[in-house]
Amino acid sequence: MRQLDANPASEANQSVRDTRRAERAKRVASDEASIVADLQRVGVSVVSVYDFVGKSAAPLVAIPVLVHHLQIAHIPVIREGVIRALGLPSAREKAFEPLCVEFSKERDPTLRWAIVNALSGMARMDEVAHLSGMAEYSGLFD
């Protein structure tokens, strides 16, 4: 570690990584700001859409906002957070059809998996089997 710390190239590399990390965090926060603002307008106070992922479920009043943002271009990490936040049985009424539509349009394998995972929390395989490419994800459904 002392050798790395003493190496100017290592220090420069760390500085570049720190700069990239800060720029990425800025892009994420900027992209997510509209979602956070829209959620605040309906009385839901969050710092990030990821506040609904693995912590507390999105309240019903947040579901239409999240569905709206599902259909808007967001950077992949924010899009994934929106998708994951919608993966609730209680979101089915408003989110099922939009998630099916987005699955049909999505080409990114990670985001397709996230959509299927969200759908598997609210639907049975026979309800989504008609979607092209869904068969490969059948193992995610009960």
Image (cartoon, rainbow, N blue to C red):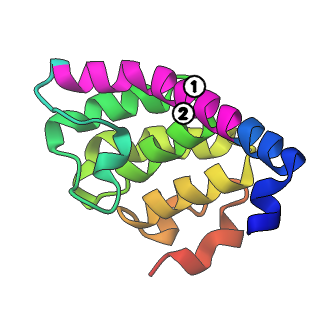
Q: Quadrant of the N terminus?
A: bottom right
Residue positioned 59% across, 63% down in the render: 129
Could you tell me how far apart the alpha carbons at marks 1 and 2 are, in whole angstroms? 6 Å
Percent of width and height locating residue 25 = 54, 33
User: Compared with residue 39, is residue 97 higher up or lower down, i.e. above or below?
Assistant: below
Does 6 lie within the magenta span?
no
In which image quadrant can residue 59 be found? top left
Q: Residues within 10 Å of mark 1 (few under 14, many from 20)?
A: few
Looking at the picture, which amino acid does disc 2 mark?
Answer: Ala
Is the Cβ of the residue at disc 1 closer than 8 Å to that at disc 2?
yes
Residue positioned 54% across, 25% down in the render: 26
Looking at the picture, which amino acid does disc 1 mark?
Answer: Arg
User: Compared with residue 6, is residue 74 higher up or lower down, i.e. above or below?
Assistant: above
Asked whether 101 or 68 is in front, the reply is 68
Extreme residue toward the left, this view: 43
Q: Secondary structure at mark 2?
A: helix
What is the magenta segment's predominant secondary structure?
helix
Residue annotated with mark 1 = 27
Percent of width and height locating residue 84 = 43, 52
Q: Secondary structure at mark 1?
A: helix
Q: Residues within 10 Å of mark 2 (few under 14, many from 20)?
A: few
Asked whether 95 or 82 is in front, the reply is 82
Residue annotated with mark 2 = 25
Extreme residue toward the right, this view: 9
In which image quadrant can residue 136 be found? bottom right
Q: Quadrant of the C terminus?
A: bottom left
Does 26 lie within the magenta span?
yes
Q: Which stretch did the figure color magenta? A: 18-40
Q: How many marks?
A: 2
In which image quadrant can residue 57 be found? bottom left
